[in-house]
Amino acid sequence: MRVLEEIAHPRYKIQIFSYNAKYIVKIELGQFEQVYKIGETDLMGLGDVKAMINEDFLKKCLPRFVAMREDWDKAFRNKNNEAEKQND
């Protein structure tokens, strides 16, 4: 996987990769990441990928990150509850 570009952003780490004839957009916030893949032949180049990563798109990423964290926290609590039940 080859890094094509890193896009500066105050909240997210955004990277664009090329791999197996696909553009891969990775958006990270803390320990979580969202990954989007699109075929290189579906676009006219890296400029099209960068144009898709606009503020409207990035605003919609935040609720997904929040939901991911909530789901992970719930899974972690459930794991601890199950371990306590087994120790009783």
Image: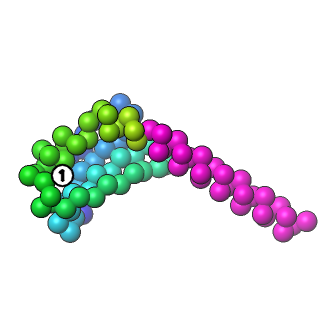
Q: Give percent across and percent down for residue 37.
A: 28, 58
Q: Main secondary structure of the magenta part?
A: helix
* Left or right: 38 as drawn, with respect to 63: left
Query: Is 82 located above or below residue 43 in the figure?
Result: below
Q: Give percent across and percent down for residue 82.
A: 78, 63
Instruction: Note whether residue 30 is visible.
Output: no
Q: How is the image coloured?
A: rainbow
* Residue lying at 35% horizontally and 54% vertically, measured from the top left: 35
Write down the region rendered in magenta: 62-88
* Residue lying at 47% horizontally and 49% vertically, measured from the top left: 32
* Residue lying at 78% horizontally and 58% vertically, measured from the top left: 81
**Rendering quarter of residue 58:** top left
Q: Which residue is mark 1?
A: 4
**Rendering quarter of residue 79:** bottom right
Q: In the depicted view, which residue is nearer to us: 35 or 12?
A: 35
Find numbered disc 1 in the image and state the secondary structure of the residue it sits on.
strand
* Residue lying at 40% horizontally and 46% vertically, measured from the top left: 28
Q: Residue furthest left?
A: 44
Q: Where is the N terminus found, in terms of image quarters?
A: bottom left
Q: Residue furthest right?
A: 88
Q: Give percent across and percent down for residue 80.
A: 75, 58
Kindly identify the amino acid type of the residue bearing the numbered disc 1: Leu
Instruction: Note whether residue 54 is visible.
Output: yes
* Left or right: 84 as drawn, with respect to 14: right
Q: Where is the C terminus found, in terms of image quarters?
A: bottom right
Query: Is 27 located above or below residue 59 in the figure?
Result: below
Q: Give percent across and percent down for residue 50.
A: 19, 43
Residue 63: within the magenta? yes
Residue 67: within the magenta? yes
**Rendering quarter of residue 3:** bottom left
Badge 1: how crowded within 10 Å, few (<14), some, or many (20+)? few
* Left or right: 65 as drawn, with respect to 24: right
